[in-house]
Image (cartoon, rainbow, N blue to C red):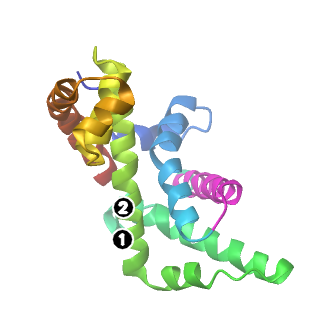
């Protein structure tokens, strides 16, 4: 059964963001994008604390710009707008670090200079965030046990040998195979719904 929160469309979420007091809209927006923003920032060389700060700034700036009518859906996709804000926040952070302590984030800056490369990093982290969220939803909305989902994650997604997974989790190899079968169909449906939500 899909997570009821998936019914919160991007349009509904954005409409809610117009009201600064709408905690539900902000929570949905934050849950959807913060993990991706943090992961991209860390891939570009920021430590977790700095990545969290940059992600927070990005989310707040987007919400502010959206409330001021600066985001036009007809001129581009939501994620393009968001990772454009992220790009500028990371660039600012790297400039400040260089001026303060001689920080060298050349590899990160090179990635920022190549729009295609930044897009690839965003895509990879978005897929991972969707998969992580889908596994969480699968556990929350089905009668599948956590150990079953863990067996599926290791064997079905990480390609660990079935017998190794079975030994690590105290299961039979047959249980590991069954875990993959039981989880795969439900996960596929949830991933499709989440992907649609992120793409709109």
Q: Would residue 174 be found to the left or right of residue 20 on screen?
A: left
Q: Which mark is residue 120?
A: 1
Q: Which mark is residue 1?
A: none
In the rendered image, is residue 6 in sight?
no
Q: CA distance from mark 2 to mark 1?
A: 6 Å
Which secondary structure is most common in the magenta stretch?
helix
- The quadrant the N terminus occupies is top left
Pinpoint residue 29: horizontal percent, then vertical percent: 48, 42
Tell me the residue at 53%/49% (across/down): 34
SS of the residue under disc 1: helix
SS of the residue under disc 2: helix
Q: Which residues make up the magenta segment?
A: 46-66
Between 119 and 185, the one nearer to me in the picture: 185
Pinpoint residue 63: horizontal percent, then vertical percent: 56, 51
Vertical side of 96 occupied by 187: above or below: above
User: Which residue has dot 2 on it?
Assistant: 124
Vertical side of 184 occupied by 72: above or below: below
Could you say which quadrant of the image residue 95 lies in?
Answer: bottom right
Q: Would residue 78 be found to the left or right of residue 48 on screen?
A: left
Residue 53 is inside the magenta segment: yes
- Label 2–label 1 contact, CB within 8 A: yes
Pinpoint residue 197: horizontal percent, then vertical percent: 30, 44
At label 1, counting other C-alpha atoms closer than 10 Å, the crowd grade (few under 14, some 14-19, many 20 or more) is few
Q: Would residue 138 be found to the left or right of residue 80 on screen?
A: left
Tell me the residue at 70%/59% (across/down): 50
């Amino acid at each position: 059964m899909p997570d009821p929160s998936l019914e919160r469309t991007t349009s509904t979420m954005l409409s809610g963001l117009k009201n600064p007091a709408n905690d539900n809209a902000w929570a949905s927006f934050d849950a959807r994008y913060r993990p991706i923003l943090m992961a991209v920032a860390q891939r570009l060389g920021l430590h977790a604390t700095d990545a969290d700060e940059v992600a927070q700034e990005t989310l707040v700036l987007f919400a502010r710009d959206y409330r001021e009518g600066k985001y036009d859906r007809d001129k581009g996709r939501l994620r393009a707008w968001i990772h454009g804000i992220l790009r500028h926040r990371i660039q600012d952070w790297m400039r400040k670090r260089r001026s303060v302590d001689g920080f060298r984030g050349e590899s990160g800056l090179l990635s920022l200079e190549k729009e295609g490369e930044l897009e690839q990093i965003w895509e990879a982290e978005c897929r991972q965030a969707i998969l992580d969220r889908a596994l969480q939803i699968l556990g929350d909305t089905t009668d599948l046990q956590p150990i079953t989902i863990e067996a599926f994650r290791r064997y079905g997604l990480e390609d660990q040998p079935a017998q190794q997974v079975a030994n690590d989790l105290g299961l039979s190899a047959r249980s590991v195979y069954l875990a993959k079968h039981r989880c795969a169909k439900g996960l596929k449906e949830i991933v499709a719904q989440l992907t649609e939500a992120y793409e709109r």
